[in-house]
Image (cartoon, helix red, strand yellow):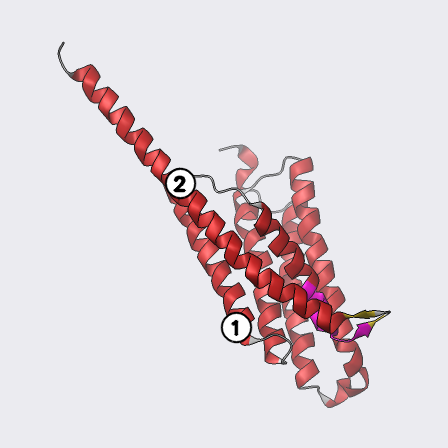
Amino acid sequence: MEKNDLEIDNLPNRLTFFRMLMIPVVVLALFFIEDTPEALVPYQAYLGHFSCWTFVLASITDFLDGYIARKRNIVTVFGSFLDPIADKFLVVSSIIMLMGIGRIHPIAVIILVLREMYMTSLRLLALTEGVDVPVNQLGKWKTGMQMTAIPMLMIYDDFLWLDLQLIGTILLYVSAFLSLSSALGYSLSMIKKLREKRAEKKRLKRESKAQREPV
């Protein structure tokens, strides 16, 4: 392990911390859309826009911390753990709050949340078994559509000439479908690699046994 592997105070981790701090801001803004305090009533129409752009800002930090970490070769244990957790916290908190104010159907939320839990468990299994499960194309499309749909559903109104409510809902349902498809793809890939690894272990064991046997 290199000397800087346990470093916490670096720019990518600061951006990840910032993203974590944005989560309660997004949650509170969406909460106040449903239960607006008297002091915020005049600004109620802006709460959706505020939560949307806060979410977008937090999402941009996700791109930036990964880009900076790769560019400067800053790979730390803490960053590798916290970065994906921050992403999941941001997305899951947002879609649960959007469900709470009636903008996402509970079935879509169940699919998306359970998929994230399943993928976390699958990656933990892959890590335990020493198997690499790379991101597939469906997973990338799922993430892109999901991250586009969520801020649209936060505004939930016409913006310029776009019906964000309709577009966001369609994108979210497509994202839910892709999440199931990509999870199936990850599972099949994982099973294949585990079988290959088991077969390789058996082959090496047979060869080792054959070498020990007297001729």
Q: Which mark is residue 134?
A: none
Report if residue 54 lies within the magenta region. no
Magenta-colored stretch includes residue 153: yes
Q: Could you say whether the residue bearing mark 1 is in a helix, strand or loop? A: helix
- Magenta residues? 149-158
Q: CA distance from mark 1 to mark 2?
A: 30 Å
Q: Is residue 176 above or below residue 72?
A: below
Nearest the eye: 189 or 55: 189
Contact between labelled residues 2 and 1, with CB atoms less than 8 Å apart: no
Mark 1 neighbour class, 10 Å CA radius: few under 14, some 14 to 19, many 20 or more: few
Q: Quadrant of the C terminus?
A: top left
Q: Do we see residue 51 in this rendering?
A: no
Q: Position of residue 182 (x, y in %)?
A: 52, 52
- Rendered residue at 54%/46% (across/down): 80
**Which residue occupies the foreground of this view, 163 or 47?**
163
Residue at position x 36%, y 40% in the image = 194
User: Where is residue 33, by image quadrant?
Assistant: bottom right
Q: Is residue 208 above or below residue 182?
A: above
Amino acid type at circle 1 is: Ile
Relative image position of residue 214 (x, y in whole percent): 13, 12
Q: Earlier in the sequence, mark 1 or mark 2?
A: 1
Left or right of residue 15, residue 121 in this image: left
Check the image and name the residue furthest to the right.
160
| One can see residue 176 in this view | yes
Identity of the residue drawn at 63% across and 49% down: 13
Direction from residue 155 to residue 3 in the image, left or right? left
The numbered dot on residue 107 is 1
Residue beneath disc 2 = 192
- Estimate the x, y position of residue 28 in percent, counting from the top left: 66, 75
- Outermost residue to the top: 215
Determine which quarter of the picture holds residue 153. Answer: bottom right
Q: Secondary structure at mark 2?
A: helix
